[in-house]
Image: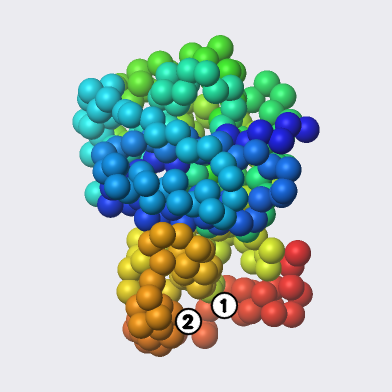
Amino acid sequence: MDNKINICISCDDNYAKHAGVVAASILVNSNPEDELCFYILDGGIKDETKELFMKLKEIKNCEFNFVSVDENLFTDYKQVKSHAYITIASYYRLKLPTLLPNVDRVIYFDCDFVVNSSLKELFNVDMKDYALAGVRDINKRMLKKKPNYVNAGMLVMDLANMRKQNLEQKFLEWTKNNAEKIKTGDQEIINSVVDGNIKIVDDCWNVQSSNFTNRSSYTNNPKAIHFVAKKKPWHFGSFSYHRPLYFKYLQLTPWKLNETEYKHWTRDNQIVSLIEYIKYRPLFMLRPRFYKALFHTYILRDK
């Protein structure tokens, strides 16, 4: 197995802190022999912010490469009228075979992730003839239509195979023909073009989590957590079940909070979060899914 692990994250200067949390979580949980190489798709990151990324090497020595992105390459993707929270940076992954011409395989992460495990096993997964690998999406309606519909927040991307299959051009052509109908941005584009021809990996690599009840897996040992709710951990009052992990890894970064801020965003936030959730779903204790989550989390304790 190869010890070199390529990771790709896309962000602008506003999301750099969250990308830094992703990177910090990967670094601190890596194996000693893991050689980590980060490719940061640069959607407008300031030079002083790049210096902050470099300080993450204090956790573990690694490589950071900032990849300048010409937004003129994404003119057709700007025509897509999907959810407002989907930025143009989300579409950068669709052109990774061109943006990273000398890289054959990479793990792509959105900025709303934390990683709790070495990525060696995931990076070296046997892709066979698949160009992409991922975890099934939490959306049951989409899974009924497409049983292998994946969540695009984490993807193992065999860029060499993507080039052979000309997927980059296929993504673009499909988008141009369907721009008015696309609802979920790049995820819809990827799933429509690949159409189930994708390697499915264990869901512990992308536990899609919004609150205690709504999680794609109730495992107590998630290897990677995806904060899929609209209110992310960095939004005060977010009721994400795994929110404390975000702040745990944030404190390892140059963006760490001071003692007063940390107390505000953890203890005070926990109280507000509970109140907000009760207001959002006052009858949560009547939902069967709540007791299913309770049983799996505290009694069955899924591995």
Q: Distance between the residues labelled 1 and 2?
A: 7 Å
**Whether residue 161 is visible:** yes
Q: Is 97 left or right of 290, judged from the image as shown?
A: left
Residue appearing at x 35%, y 78% in the figure: 261
Expressed as whole percent of the image width and height from the top left, the position of residue 70 reads 27, 25
What's the mark number on residue 102? none
Among the two numbered marks 1 and 2 on one chain, the one whose residue lies closer to the N terminus: 2
| Location of residue 125 (image quadrant) | top right
129 and 20: which one is in front?
20
Q: Mark 1 points at which residue?
A: 290
For the residues labelled 1 and 2, say whether their Cβ atoms are less than 8 Å apart.
yes
User: Eyeballing the image, is 212 above or below 18?
Assistant: below
Residue positioned 53% across, 37% down in the render: 63
Q: In the depicted view, which residue is nearer to us: 143 or 259?
A: 259
Q: Which quarter of the figure has residue 72? A: top left
**Which of the 4 image quarters holds residue 87?**
top left
Quadrant into which the N terminus falls:
top right
Residue found at x 57% / y 77% = 290
Residue drawn 24% across the image and 49% down it:
84
User: Quadrant location of the C terminus?
Assistant: bottom right
The image position of residue 24, as x and y in percent, is: 52, 55
Coordinates of residue 225 in the picture (x, y in percent): 55, 58
Question: Which of 132 and 82 lies nearest the eye of the viewer?
Answer: 132
Are there few (<14), some (14-19), or many (20+) residues within 10 Å of tag 2? some
Q: Name the residue under label 2.
A: 284
Q: Is residue 138 visible?
A: no
Amino acid tagged 1: Phe
